[in-house]
Image (tube, rainbow, N blue to C red):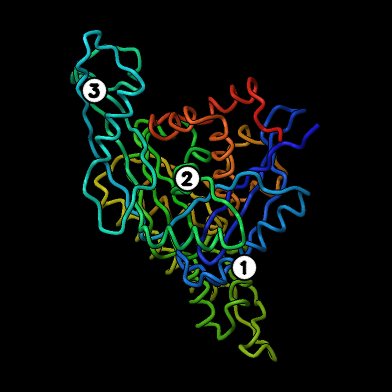
Amino acid sequence: MAKPNLIAGLDIGSGKMTCVAVAHDTETNTLKVLAGRSVPCKGLRGGMVSDIRETSASVTHILGSIERECNRDIGNLFVGMRGAHLESFSNHGTYNISRMDKEITQADMELAVENAKAMPIKNDNEIVNVITQGYSIDKQRGISNPEGMEGSLLEVDVHITTGSSTHINNLAKAIQRPGYKIDDTFYSLVPLADCVLTQEEKEIGALILDLGGETMSVGIYIDGILKFSRDIPYGCDLITSDLSRLLHTSRTHAKEIKEKYGVSFPTFLDEEGEIPVPSLDGRSTHNIKKSYVLDIIQPRVEELIEQVAQCVDNSGYRNFPVVGVVTGGGSLMPGITEHCVNILGLKEVRRGTVQRELITSDEAFFDPQYSTAMSVAIYAASLMGGQDFARSSYEKGGSMFGKLGRWLKGVDIFGG
């Protein structure tokens, strides 16, 4: 029996890239994570390519190691991207049904979406994703799927993400240089939110925050619909820089101190004590109090979350999110959720990982640093179910995962 097709989700992050490979497990009839890697990349800054050779070398390393571990080639590669060059906004489209029967078809819905996409965007920008927020028929709003219904005027609200063609093409070149083929590229926050947020959270009003090293991705869901998304060009690497400068140590040692001893809220300082700090040349060490590390980290974390608050204020949806979900590598620091509650004014904030019912995986890959790559891989697998399935996830605004389960039961398209 042929091995199931290997589908990879590649997360282009802040100074690093993360990949998770999945396949259909015939025994359990589920998606299963077969391998995953996260590697630093000197050719990436803020999710954008700064050195194409360095980026290509990291692509070769991470995808090659995945293929060797799985003992097969990657069959399909999907890429999730982020960065300050990405912009998201909402728009409205209409389409007149002129036929005698007035019955709305899939083609009519697609034409309405196309009309919504027909809007001026910046030079050198292109549309990355279009997510349908809802339809109306003859001014009757609140229709999620108008196919088969009757009406004369079909209207649609969409959420559009655009990005710099230059940055997108440079990223594609860096990945294709080693010989890999990209099946699709999209804004990573969208599949991440679908995998991390529950439907109840989306309905009540939720803010999702992906804390990366050089970027923070913010999304707001209201009534189950993505209303706002934005990437902020700052991230948790600023904490590492602060520690390196004020502790007079290398960035590598500062990162180790941050991950081992760093807390951002006083209640998480378990006990006072001293920790060793290597000098810049690594030949000697000096001791500092744990509370001094807190004194360095806390103001920077507060500043980062205040940047998120300002972004939410500017979105026009300041009073709508009730709950928050924080994910990404930065979410692992103790105290982050408490700062989000205090500064963002949310009722409840939790650390988010991929919902376990969506995929079978070793515990290690449910770590928040793998959340985006795993979400990209799950979405990639859903796309393999056919083009209608892809449209239902993005252009119709539905959740991909309800269909994913039904598709896995009825269609075996993974063999090859």
Q: Quadrant of the N terminus?
A: top right
Q: Which residue is mark 3?
A: 154
Relative image position of residue 182 (x, y in whole percent): 54, 50
Q: Is disc 3 placed on a helix, strand or loop?
A: strand
Disc 1 residue type (three-letter):
Ala
The number of discs equals 3
Give the CA distance from mark 3 to mark 1.
Answer: 49 Å
Label 2 crowd (10 A; few <14 / some 14-19 / many >=20): many
Front: mark 2 or 3: 3
Front residue of 342/231: it is: 231
Instruction: Tell me where residue 89 appears, x and y as whole percent.
Output: 28, 46
- The vertical placement of 134 against 85, above or below, is above
Q: Residues within 10 Å of mark 1 (few under 14, many from 20)?
A: some
Q: Secondary structure at mark 1?
A: helix
Q: Give the foreground label among 1 and 2.
A: 1
Write down the quadrant of residue 408 in the picture: top right
Say which mark, if any, is on residue 325. Answer: 2
Residue beneath disc 1 = 57
Give me the residue at 59% from left, 24% from top.
Answer: 407
> Tag 2: residue type?
Val
Q: Residue at the right extreme? A: 1
| Screen quadrant of the C terminus | top right
On screen, residue 221 above or below 96: below
Could you tell me which residue is drawn at 70 percent across and 27 percent down? 29
Residue shown at 36% from the left, 34% from the top: 225
